[in-house]
Image (cartoon, rainbow, N blue to C red):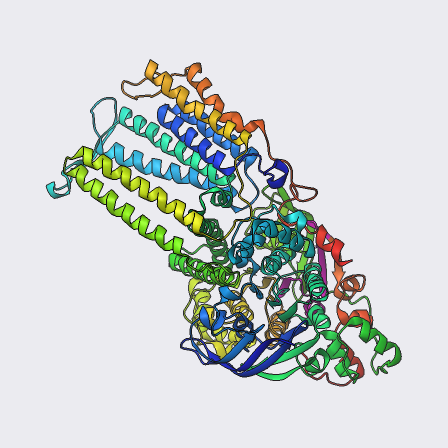
Amino acid sequence: MRTPSATHRPWHSATWLIWALAAAGSVQLAPSPVYVALVIGIAWLMVETHAADGPYRRAFPALVLLGVIFASVRVVIAALTTHNGVDVIVTLPQATTPQILGGFTIGGTLEAGVVLSSLASGFTIVGMLAVFGAFNSIASHYELVQSSPRAFHELGLITTVALAFVPATIESVTAVREADMARTGGRKIRRGRLIRMIVPVLERGMERAIALSESMDSRGFGNAPSARAERKSGWCGLAALLVLGAAFVALVGRAPATAIALSLLGAFLLILAVLLSSRGSARQRYRHIRMATADWLLAGVSLLSPLLLGFVAIVGNDSLAWYASPLVWPTFDPVVALCLVPLLAPLLRLPVPMSGIDVGTGAYEHQPDMAETT
Amino acid sequence: MTAITFADVSYGYPDGPLALQQIDLAVDAGEILLVVGSSGSGKSTLLRAVNGIVPHSTGGRFAGDVTVVERSTREHLPRALADVVGFVHQDPEAHFVVDRVEADVAFVLENIGFSQVSMRRRVEEVLDALGIAHLRDRNPATLSGGERQRCAIAGALASAPSVLVLDEPTSQLDPQGAESVLAAVTRLNADLGTTVLIAEHRLERAAPIADRAVLVTDGRVSLGPSETGSVLATYPGAPSVTRLGRLLGWDPPPLTVRDARRRYATHRPSLNAPIPDLADAPASGDLAISATGISVRLGARVAVHGVDLDLHQGEVTALLGRNGSGKTTLLRALAGLTKVDKGTVTTHATIGYVPQDPNTLLFSPTVREEVRETLTLLGRSDNALVDRWIDVLGLHDLSDRHPRSLSGGERQRVAIAAVAVGGAAVLLLDEPTRGMDAESRHALERAISAHVKEGGSVVLATHDIELAARCANRVVVMGDGEVVANGSARDVLSGSLFAPQVLRVMPPFLTVEEVANALNTPSRNTP
């Protein structure tokens, strides 16, 4: 079905999804900055070795940056609002918000313990986003869509198309900022820059969206007549939602037995709806890219990491998490580090360089054109 | 057999005037029909009516009937015509739905409901038909313009439609890329009998492959459909050889360099003025920019490598080279927009840079305000200057329009005016004639010569050899990030395989205007 030479991607995208879940689980189970740094390093290594050329490659740095921003905001807020009075670094003027806004104190003492522990938890956010970024840089979203149940095909496709607008918008922002600078001969003028940025970016996005919808329309997207099965599946889905809603009501109403029964029924109806819709769709997919044995093996190996870490945690290991008060350095335990080694497994098979000329020399290869015109 | 029939079709966009008026047109099965006309004449609207995007996606008022292979667009939505009409949008970047070439080609097949077995076979055939099998696993965003355009055509063609509609397929391509795309189209037409409807501004390559042409003016078919040569005989945007033939009174005017050479061999005109000197030295005023040994890296790739370049005042320099040869990067380095890794750029004058995509610049509600905005940003206000640039670039009639409502070529002119008004002595224009019709090109050429006359200088990065021949006095050719030729326009272009058409027929003349001067007769329809 799928050979490495057919796609040049050594591992299936669904495998990468499982890998990412395993890595994210590891970050949660071993939140000490030492191990989070290790996971971020592994994610980076995967991006360097496996990410394909294209706009998504930038997902990794972009999401890491987003994580850093989130974490910094978190640190500032935590430092200003949480106080334990130990290891004070500096005392700032303080203000207490009115009772109606919670009545908490902003400012006052800044403690080393609070800052460090919020830095550490911020770092786990960076770790999670790095793992997510690595997944987005490496995996093909389209391949994921192709391997999902057929009922989700159109939904998945629309999602991937929408996702493609993210790198396009980032590119647009860069181009617009540059054009703005070029307009004044390299002088940066801040006044009114926001509107000069936003209008062209939005309008370009809008024009692109319209063109894309025309392209999809003229290539027959959404042309399938809605079949009877589709309607059946719709009713099934509706019933499933109602039953699940009832289950929730039962749960709130403290009737756990009814709640469990109803949610089981709801889940059954939901699966039935998906199956009906998948069977009913007359359309076939170009390539149903299945996971090969090696993919399943790799997925299993990756999952070893969180499993081993969970085991270590149950046995009891002080090194997994780090609490900044009292002030001590985080410790490093080689056993925990060894638990992270399975996350390196994708390195067992590296991408095959693409046939012939095109990798390496980058984006603008032109020899084939020349050859044909002669 | 007619493949497409327009019967008394009129159409107006919502809140707009009529874009098409009483169009009657029959396109024969198996022919290549070329649609010409100036920007905003309704060419694109006409093309989009073929598979019902107009009016189904755009809304508006529609009258009459369009029939494609016996299906009326009144009863069939665009998606229901996907198996008979392949449509390729002007901007191929917006065409791709899936981020892998092979899967994008299969997209239409999945939608139509092909079986998996026949899909696999069809995709392989289409990849071969367009010569893109080696690109199958690439992300379209990483391809060159020519490759991307061929992939987009493959995506439209996979369903083996009997009609292929191409909206300006070569407007963004270098000569080599344009040739490969048109060669692929010709091959499809010859091998599969596909009917092709193609709208184009740059006709040097597109005109010879067409069987017939039709001229659209103000939403009406004003000439044709008839033989390409007779439609283009009076058209201002005709290829240079056609205009040369018109000047020399050859009837019918030639469409290709080959035709023109044959005619020239038997009908040599007698010239009254001396033949231009081959060694026209570039005008050299004061040094404006001097770059020595500059190299620029983009990621892992060296985009510009060890370039030495001196630009003088009063000089128009054309920067030629295939897509990806480093033209844009060099311009950006000269403008100080990108970091130079090695070497130095010394500037003795102010520099203005107009990016390839004018849309990155435009945000004001009217053209006039857009141009004035630059001065406001620089803390000046000079209405006379604003008016001057609006006039020079022929934007007077458009000055109260919204820049986004204009055509691509008109937007490009607005962007140039908006940058030039800032008073930069050196103007760096990146691909300024993309999507421009003859009239826009003419206005641009006037603006360039006006700017140079006042002691400014202009650098054009362009694929348009004819433009370089008409207005540059120096030509720099780049290849793989290096300067491979640098000298007077006539000198450099003479040795080129992709020389301007007139030079290939009557060396050492570069343009129709030069021949006209030598004949001492004013050239008719100069653009």
Residue A312 percent across, percent down from the top left: 37, 16
Residue occupying the far left of the picture: A99
The image quarter containing residue B420 is: bottom right
Q: Is residue A9 left or right of residue A330?
A: right
Q: Is residue A241 left or right of residue A366?
A: left
Residue B343 shows in the view = yes
Residue B29 percent across, percent down from the top left: 66, 73
For this rendering, which residue is in front, B248 or B124? Answer: B124
**Residue at the (50%, 71%) spot, across then down:** B52
Residue B295 shows in the view = no
Residue A96 percent across, percent down from the top left: 15, 38
Q: Quadrant of the N terminus of chain B?
A: bottom right
* Above or below, A108 relative to B76: above
Q: Quadrant of the C terminus of chain B?
A: bottom right
**Residue at the (43%, 35%) spot, across then down:** A130
* Above or below, B292 relative to A131: below
B464 drawn magenta? yes
Residue A116 percent across, percent down from the top left: 32, 26
**Residue at the (27%, 18%) spot, across then down:** A326
Q: How many marks?
A: 0
For this rendering, which residue is in front, B500 or A5? Answer: A5
Q: Which residues are magenta?
A: B456-483
A209 drawn magenta? no
Residue occupying the far right of the picture: B266
For this rendering, which residue is in front, B431 or B119? Answer: B119
For this rendering, which residue is in front, A158 or B334? Answer: A158
* Above or below, B129 relative to A319: below
Q: Is residue B469 left or right of residue A90?
A: right
